[in-house]
Image: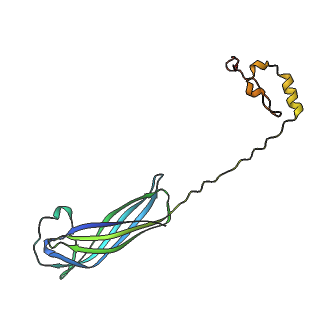
Amino acid sequence: MKKVQWEMNEKFIFPEAAGLPRGAEKVKVTPRFLEEATEDAVRLKGIYHIAANVSFDEGEYSLEDYSKAILIDDVDLNEQMGYFEYAVPLNIDLPSDAGDPLEVRVSNARCTVNGQGVCEINWDVECSYKEIVVEEKVVEKVVEIEEVPKTAVAILETSVVHDEDEVLSFLSELEDGFSSTIFRSNDVFMESKG
């Protein structure tokens, strides 16, 4: 099994009427995705579903980190405790050799607050999958070479008229069982000089 790990985070702010977030009693992040295979990769598309119980206190917001945070308008408040849910996009590209079983697990979901109104949810992601090993089959092809009877070679040699000067010297010195043939290249005879 091959494993890939990384860390995710998302920053949230809440309506001023809720107060300043001071921490979280419970944070749960659940990955939900669909698998899509292409020629180049295995793509996982879905969401990380965040559900959190955040405690609030009275206080004033600072405007420093608002631009990088997501405003959660819909907070279910019960005195100083608030509950919210949010979906963060999940897009993971794995190599094309990623196969089943394919799992995405979330661990160590936690909440940190900066005291200025920003609540940051962090979680660790581990994706594990089995690598598909493509085995290459080696096929041996055995070719049987039949020995040509000497009578057939003798018939061929007598039917071909050739001049010894036209045959390359290394061809004429071949052992028995081999035959030499003259080939024409664009009707031009090839000669070896030597």
Viewer-closest of 63 and 193: 193
185 left or right, relative to 179:
left
Q: How is the image coloured?
A: rainbow
Tell me if I can see residue 61 in this picture.
yes
Residue 4's x, y, as percent? Answer: 41, 65
Horizontal arrangement in the rendering, residue 55 relative to residue 35 (left or right) = left
* Direction bottom: furthest residue: 79
What residue is at 71 percent from the left and 47 percent from the top?
141
**Is residue 72 among what the camera can see?**
no
Q: Residue furthest right?
A: 151
Number of callouts in the render? 0
In the rendered image, residue 3, in percent from the top left (x then y), is placed at 44, 66
Point out the image quarter for the C terminus: top right
Q: Residue furthest top?
A: 188
- For residue 52, above or below residue 38: below
Identify which residue, 4 or 147, lies in the foreground: 147
- Residue 119 location, quadrant: bottom left
Which one is in front, 173 or 122? 173
1 in relation to 141, above or below? below
Quadrant for residue 81, please give it.
bottom left
Picture coordinates of residue 112, whole percent (x, y) = 23, 74
Q: Residue at x 59, y 56 (%)?
A: 135
Q: Farthest front residue?
A: 194
Residue 173: image location, x then y, percent: 78, 28
Task: Please name whichever residue, 112 or 25, is drawn nearer the observer in this view of the structure.
Answer: 112
